[in-house]
Image (cartoon, grey):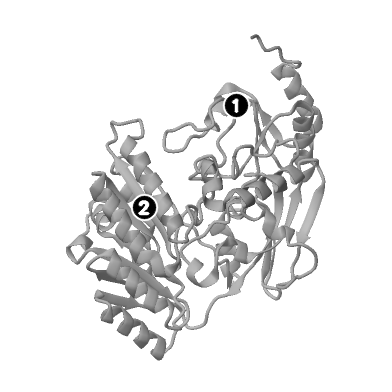
């Protein structure tokens, strides 16, 4: 059956230009292809968008929404396009609405200890600006140098310091949001406490652009701790032993700010990547940081780690040496990804189940004859198993799909989640019913229908 469109693409773009006056609108094929995006070489959202819009004002965002409503055009919000779950891949005949140019730090208030930023501000840039005033921005995903605050808020990004400071949601105090119908909502504010009305601020955190377009964010900042930090590394015979040490340290009252784990294959990949010999020491590496400490905290930390089999424990307050240790964590992903085609996953389980989850991942690798590199934020039970297969195999092997299904179901059986910090996107939206249950899944769809009745905002993301 032949489908006849009521309007040509040219007519729609012309109408869009009538409502968007200050922002750049691109409809040429080269630009559209450049922003098509794909994840792991698999185009989950195939097809070129109709236009790529570089928003510079709330008024223009409202203009985009007005045109989208008239012609029923899907809108894909985007900032730096660093999603690992195909959260901002273009949808065929959509408007890709980029906030990357809305990148101003509007205010840093050292008295109220807050910052007000636009969504395109880079995480690391905000932290650097805050530190210049004696403060810091706590959420620190591995993509900190390239990911935006808007994207971090939309996905409720985690990070290496989540163990002490929480995920992004724990630092968000207020939002300005444009709804699908063009209304602008100002939610939350500058105060550290607020108990009036329903907490709509937190409803939009982690909503992945499906409920509204975030245009301004008020975040909490922390004073830089006195006395400097202690950074360290230790090695264990395996990840299970490391997980046991982490669990005891978490319950000790030492309050570490970071507890990062790398298994033996990951450490070996680092050695190949950096021409080092860390894998000679043992089977797993722990990277830790204490933001505040005294002699008792240091001694307790050492005793717990050594009691649980830590080898080659090294702690330092020297910033240069600390940065060398942290660079190992930053180099982890490029070291692993260099070994072939890959898919990196993101599961979180209760701390008491971390060792069991890690054991299970190792069993799956052996059972299915796969190479799996397991690392992650051990301090909050968040693991990132990365499955790698030969670069020549462009299609995802069946064994990889089977491994993902088995790991997801194990995480759920242990009382965990299949998305600790990377969000849902298109990659995991078919798992909603299995993780949430049918009743909660239905309520999620009802919330979506309330805020976006025409289903224009990032359709098929977050919920299927």
The image quarter in which residue 285 lies: bottom left
Q: Residue at x 66, y 49 (%)?
A: 444
Spatial CA span between label 2 and label 1 = 31 Å
Residue density around tag 1, few if under 14, some if 14–19, many if 20 or more, within 10 Å: some
Q: Residue at x 22, y 54 (%)?
A: 275
SS at mark 2 in the image: strand
Q: Position of residue 438 (x, y in %)?
A: 60, 48
Q: Is residue 12 left or right of residue 402?
A: right
Mark yes or no: residue 28 visible.
yes
Q: Is residue 271 above or below residue 224?
A: above
The image quarter in which residue 464 lies: top right
Closest to the camera, between mark 2 and mark 1, is 2
SS at mark 1 in the image: loop
Which quadrant holds the N terminus? Answer: top right
Q: Position of residue 392 (x, y in %)?
A: 28, 31
| Residue marked by disc 2 | 385
The image quarter in which residue 388 lies: top left
Whether tag 2 and tag 1 are in contact, CB under 8 A, the answer is: no
| Residue marked by disc 1 | 92
Q: Position of residue 78 (x, y in %)?
A: 61, 42
Closest to the observer, 390 or 203: 203
Give the residue furthest to the top: 2
């Amino acid at each position: 059956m032949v489908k006849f469109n009521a309007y040509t693409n040219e007519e729609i773009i012309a109408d869009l230009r009538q409502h968007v006056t200050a922002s750049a609108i691109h409809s040429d094929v080269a630009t559209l292809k450049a922003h098509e995006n794909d994840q792991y070489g698999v185009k989950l959202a195939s097809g070129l968008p109709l236009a790529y819009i570089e928003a510079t004002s709330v008024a223009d965002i409202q203009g985009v929404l007005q045109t989208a409503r008239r012609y029923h055009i899907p809108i894909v919000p985007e900032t730096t396009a660093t999603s690992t779950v195909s959260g901002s891949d273009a949808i065929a005949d959509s408007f890709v609405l980029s906030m990357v140019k809305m990148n101003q730090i509007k205010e840093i208030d050292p008295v109220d200890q807050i910052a007000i930023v636009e969504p395109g501000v880079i995480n690391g840039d905000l932290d650097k600006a805050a530190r210049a005033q004696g403060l810091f921005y706590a959420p620190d995903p591995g993509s900190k140098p390239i990911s935006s605050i808007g994207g971090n808020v939309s996905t409720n990004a985690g990070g290496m310091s989540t163990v002490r400071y929480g995920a992004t949601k724990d630092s968000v105090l207020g939002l300005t949001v444009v709804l699908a119908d063009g209304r602008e909502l100002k939610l939350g504010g500058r105060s550290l406490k607020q108990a009036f009305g329903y907490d709509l601020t937190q409803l939009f955190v982690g909503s992945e652009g499906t409920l509204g377009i975030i245009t301004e964010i008020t975040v909490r900042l922390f004073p830089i701790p006195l006395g400097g930090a202690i950074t360290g590394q230790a090695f264990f015979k395996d990840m299970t032993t490391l997980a046991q040490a982490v669990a005891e340290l978490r319950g000790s009252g030492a309050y570490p700010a970071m507890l990062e784990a790398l298994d033996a294959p990951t450490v070996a990949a680092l050695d190949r990547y950096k021409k080092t010999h860390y894998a000679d020491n043992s089977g797993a590496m722990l990277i830790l940081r204490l933001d505040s400490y005294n002699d008792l905290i240091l001694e307790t930390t050492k005793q717990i780690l050594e009691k649980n089999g830590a080898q080659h424990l090294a702690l330092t307050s020297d910033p240069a040496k600390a940065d060398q240790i942290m660079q190992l964590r930053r180099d982890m992903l490029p070291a692993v990804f260099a070994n072939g085609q890959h898919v990196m996953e993101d599961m979180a389980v209760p701390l008491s189940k971390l060792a069991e989850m890690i054991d299970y991942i190792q069993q799956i690798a052996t059972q299915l004859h796969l190479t799996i590199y397991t690392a992650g934020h051990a301090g909050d039970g968040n693991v990132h198993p990365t499955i790698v297969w030969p670069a020549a195999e462009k299609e995802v092997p069946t064994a990889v799909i089977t491994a993902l299904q088995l790991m997801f179901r194990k995480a759920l059986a242990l009382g965990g989640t299949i998305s600790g910090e990377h969000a849902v996107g298109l990659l995991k939206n078919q798992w909603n019913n299995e993780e949430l249950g049918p009743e909660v899944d239905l309520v999620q769809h009802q919330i979506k229908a309330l805020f976006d009745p025409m289903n224009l905002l990032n359709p098929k993301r977050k919920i299927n």
